[in-house]
Amino acid sequence: MPTLCLWLADGVLVLHGLVVLFNIGALPLIWVGYLRKWSLVRNPYFRAAHLLLLGYVVAETALGANCPLTVLEDTLRLKAGGGSAYQRGFIAHWLQPLIFWDVEPWVFVLLYALFFALVVFTFVRIRPRAPGWWVRQALKPQPRIDTNTH
């Protein structure tokens, strides 16, 4: 069971790393894609996921809440027996320092808020296209309202 918990904890850590990569990497991808006219950067689901996920991170940090992925990873590592850096495994040993920094919480709040402001600016400046269901709804014939009633 401890080995399984350690593998699961490493999996959560990798997932956490991918979320961080998505949150950070999507912004330059959007600007490069805008300049190169890539359709992905106007995808409403990609853009909404980026905006909402980053907004969630800013809100949880500002409120002093712990990230659910961090809590899950810590819980799994405790169930596995915890231990030193070498007992955590290769992935945890190398990936954790890239994701978790030892600075005051207000620094994270400030950095996340500034980055989120840049993402919101980008969302307004480089608008995503309307979702397909929205366009279909807008094109659907509307019932005619007779305004010339006597």
Image (tube, rainbow, N blue to C red):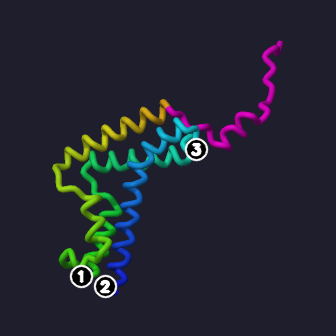
List the single residue furthest toward the bottom: 1
Residue 61: give x, y in percent of width and height. 28, 49
List the single residue furthest toward the front: 36
Please check the rendered image and state whether residue 127 is part of the magenta-colored stretch, yes or no.
yes
| Amino acid on which the number 1 mark rests in the picture | Gly
Q: Are marks 1 and 3 in contact (CB under 8 Å)?
A: no
- Quadrant of the image occupied by residue 130: top right
Where does the N terminus fall, quadrant-wise? bottom left
Q: Are marks 3 and 2 in contact (CB under 8 Å)?
A: no
Residue 144: give x, y in percent of width and height. 81, 26
- The residue wearing badge 3 is 43
| Amino acid on which the number 3 mark rests in the picture | Asn
User: Quick one: 62 or 100, which is closer to the camera?
Assistant: 100
Q: CA distance from mark 2 to mark 1?
A: 7 Å
Locate residue 25 relative to residue 106 in the image: left or right: right
* Identity of the residue drawn at 28% across and 80% down: 79
Q: Is residue 22 above or below residue 122?
A: below
| Amino acid on which the number 2 mark rests in the picture | Pro
* Identity of the residue drawn at 38% across and 36% down: 118
Please check the rendered image and state whether residue 18 is part of the magenta-colored stretch, yes or no.
no
- The residue wearing badge 1 is 81
- The residue wearing badge 2 is 2
Locate residue 99 relative to residue 102 in the image: left or right: right
* Identity of the residue drawn at 37% across and 55% down: 20
- Magenta region, residue range: 126-150
- Quadrant of the image occupied by residue 82: bottom left
Where does the C terminus fall, quadrant-wise? top right
